[in-house]
Image (cartoon, helix red, strand yellow):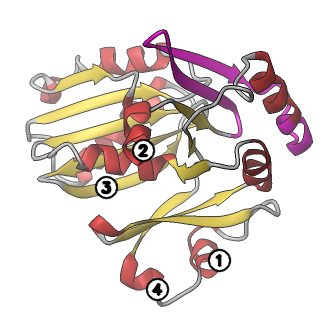
């Protein structure tokens, strides 16, 4: 199956597709984040790469946004998405839409905000697009791997990162944190592990940079985490295809 995988945020876009049986990965950082300019830049990007004329079987889009939360399915059914979002984050700063992805196999719903330009651009240009939040992709990917051993996954963007913890095929933690340096990422990760009383457990940590984010900060985090005495037995790795592999589970 010929699939175009797209990782999208308000900062940047990353496309991944097979070319001569090898993955072709292209990142592009938006130079202007006004809605009409993002749509113009997206059009130019897809035209320049010839991706609007390529006949892909599927266009799978992973939308990244810092404000995302998980709601138990039974709680979600008793209220409206807008009310639940306002309760968690307040009123959205623009006129986009509150959206959600059901993850019925785990009894949760991922609730998030998505700017109006996302759907208006992709529905018009790629009518067969499947758009879901990256947290939804990530959780499905992690929890499909028979994650019995404690595992932390970190997905890093320019000003925030997503942290998840799973153990025995159960989700223990899911949240986003502001970050401006590798020290911020390390602090929040260790704080969560301490609060969950998991510092002494055998742990695997995987870290990946999101679209438009330099890998250097991931390497810095790995370097410093490996120097922490209580994490000496921890397996800490960089995983370049973390989101891509999770997205492909939607095919």
Mark 2 or 3, nearer chain start? 3
Helix, strand or loop under label 1: helix
Q: Position of residue 108 (x, y in %)?
A: 37, 69
On the image, which quarter does residue 28 sit in?
A: top right
Mark 3 or 1, nearer chain start? 1
Are circles 3 and 4 on residues that touch, CB within 8 Å? no
The residue where tag 1 is placed is 82
Helix, strand or loop under label 3: strand
> Where does the magenta region start and end?
10-39
The residue where tag 4 is placed is 77
Residue 18 lies in the magenta stretch: yes
The residue where tag 3 is placed is 173
Q: Which disc, if any, is residue 251?
A: 2
Mark 1 or 2, nearer chain start? 1
Report the front residue among 20 and 170: 20
| Residue appearing at x 43%, y 35% in the figure | 243
State how far apart marks 2 and 4 are (Cα).
27 Å
Front position among marks 3 and 1: 1
Position of residue 92 in the picture relative to residue 142 (left or right) = right
Are circles 3 and 1 on residues that touch, CB within 8 Å? no
């Amino acid at each position: 199956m010929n699939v175009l995988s797209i990782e999208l945020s308000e900062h940047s876009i990353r496309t991944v597709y097979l070319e001569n049986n090898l993955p072709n990965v292209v990142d592009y950082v938006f130079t202007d984040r006004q809605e009409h300019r993002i749509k113009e830049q997206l059009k130019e990007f897809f035209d320049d790469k010839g991706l609007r004329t390529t006949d892909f079987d599927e266009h799978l889009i992973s939308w990244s946004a810092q404000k995302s939360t998980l709601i138990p399915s039974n709680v979600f059914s008793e209220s409206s998405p807008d009310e639940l979002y306002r309760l968690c984050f307040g009123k959205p700063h623009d006129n986009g839409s509150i959206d959600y992805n059901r993850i019925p196999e785990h009894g949760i719903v991922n609730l998030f905000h998505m700017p109006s330009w996302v759907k208006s651009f992709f529905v018009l240009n790629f009518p067969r697009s499947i758009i879901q939040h990256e947290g939804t992709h990530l959780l499905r990917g992690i929890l499909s791997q028979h994650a019995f051993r404690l595992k932390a996954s970190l997905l890093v963007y320019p000003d925030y990162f997503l942290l998840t913890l799973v153990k025995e095929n159960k989700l223990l933690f899911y949240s986003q944190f502001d970050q401006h340096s590798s020290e911020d990422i390390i602090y929040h990760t260790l704080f969560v592990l301490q609060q969950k009383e998991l510092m002494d457990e055998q742990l695997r940590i995987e870290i990946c940079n999101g679209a438009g984010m330099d890998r250097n900060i991931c390497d810095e985090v790995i370097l410093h985490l490996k120097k922490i005495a209580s994490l000496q037995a921890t397996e800490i790795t960089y995983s370049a295809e973390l989101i891509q592999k999770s997205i492909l589970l939607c095919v």
